[in-house]
Image (cartoon, rainbow, N blue to C red):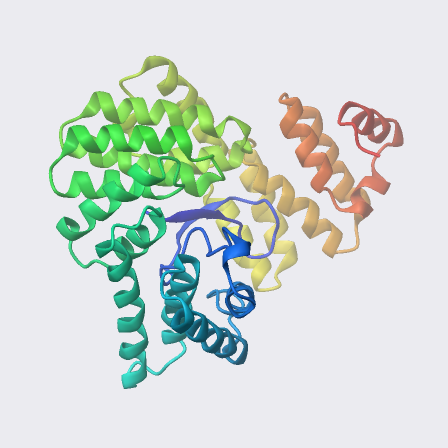
Amino acid sequence: MSAKVLLVAGWGLLSPVLAQVPPSPPSAAPKPSVATPATLSPTAQEGIRLAQRNCPSDGFDKAGCAKAIDLLQKAAAEDPNQQDVQLALAQAYWNTSFRESPQARSQGDLRQRAMDIYRRQVELGSKDARPYWELSLRQKDEAGRLPLLRRTVELNPAHPQANRELARTELAVGEVDAAVRSYQKHLEVSPYRDSSDALAHLDFAKQLEDVGRPKDATQVTEQVSTLMQGERRATRCEVWRAADPKLYEQKAELSKKVKALLPYCTETASLQQATELARQGRVDEAIVAAKRQIAENPKVEGAHVMLERLYQDKGEPAQAAQVATQHLEQEADSKEKCERFKELAPATVRAMPQDQVETLRRDCRQP
């Protein structure tokens, strides 16, 4: 699973929803770098520099990458043993191929050149993890990926992605014990970034549950709970709402925590209606629906956010300030209160009681 928590249709922090993120073409991690500048010719150094700048899939520059390829080809002809040059050239070929027409022979040629470089580095027994990793990304079968991924983590135990992919591959071929160990290594060495990581971890936990390893699944699930402690409450709620209850219901403390959290992102039918009405420009009807949502389930922060913004759209800052004030007074969690205060529209803050504003600024350490 690859997903992110997204926000609803231009309304800031409303009711986060989970959306699948489309896959992107595989690319190098990390990028080629000049590991030993003194051993590289000026042509090689300039080729690598241009490749780093112009050839990544994000911000790809066709002319600039073509120039990088030309320089890298010259450097490789002068000295074919410079691994940074070879890897930069392979990645430049690969990324350029995605700019070619799928029907063009050049696309296949460029990809074949990249694959040939990676295979040659692997066959030569490179002590660098990158060619093994890059080649693993381009294997069509799990059995072919497995030895490449194992060599990757052998050479770079803290690789940010390889331990995760190794665990998934081991699980796919039925090596469950090895998969559990590899995923624990992934959790150990890969820094937590955001809720997309939490969703990925829970997806793996669900796979462990499905192959009859509930204890291992629960262990991963509990680690996810710890990793998410710094996330906003609404985000944590959406993540747990997407999770299979089997992953947490056997642990009393965790189950209690999740069940206490779920009301903050469930029973949101009226908020969804308000969102659609606002999208259509039917502001007064959207206000009625947002108020109904607050009456039905006041824990859903998105309803308060929407109602405040709707009143601002109508040019009624006093009403917006009243909504915000009441919401902040009801919020018992100091961190959530400060985050909500930080997100208020400036016009709302100006219309709020100034003694309350000063107290919030002091408590939240905001100017």
Q: Quadrant of the C terminus?
A: top right
Picture quadrant where residue 196 is located:
top left
Picture quadrant where residue 248 is located:
top left
Q: Residue furthest right?
A: 354
- Place of residue 95 in the rendered image (x, y in percent of width and height, measured from the top left): 40, 69
- Place of residue 48 in the rendered image (x, y in percent of width and height, measured from the top left): 51, 64
- Place of residue 148 in the rendered image (x, y in percent of width and height, measured from the top left): 23, 48
Answer with left or right where residue 315 lies relative to residue 343: right
Q: Residue furthest bottom?
A: 104
Q: Residue furthest left?
A: 174
The reply to whether residue 266 is visible in this rendering is no
In the image, residue 280 sits, relative to residue 289, either above or below, namely below
Residue under the point 21% across and 58% down: 139
Answer with left or right where residue 307 lies relative to residue 314: left
Q: Of 125 and 329, which appears nearest the observer?
A: 125
The reply to whether residue 161 is visible in this rendering is yes
Answer with left or right where residue 14 lies relative to residue 83: right
In the image, residue 83 sits, relative to residue 107, either above or below, namely above
Residue under the point 25% across and 43% down: 151
- Place of residue 55 in the rendered image (x, y in percent of width and height, measured from the top left): 48, 68
How many callouts does the rendering have?
Answer: 0
Residue under the point 49% across and 39% down: 193
Residue under the point 74% across and 32% down: 325
In the image, residue 230 sits, relative to residue 344, either above or below, namely above
Q: Of 302 and 316, which appears nearest the observer?
A: 302
Q: Of 64 and 170, which appears nearest the observer?
A: 64
Answer with left or right where residue 209 lies relative to residue 324: left
Picture quadrant where residue 314 is located:
bottom right
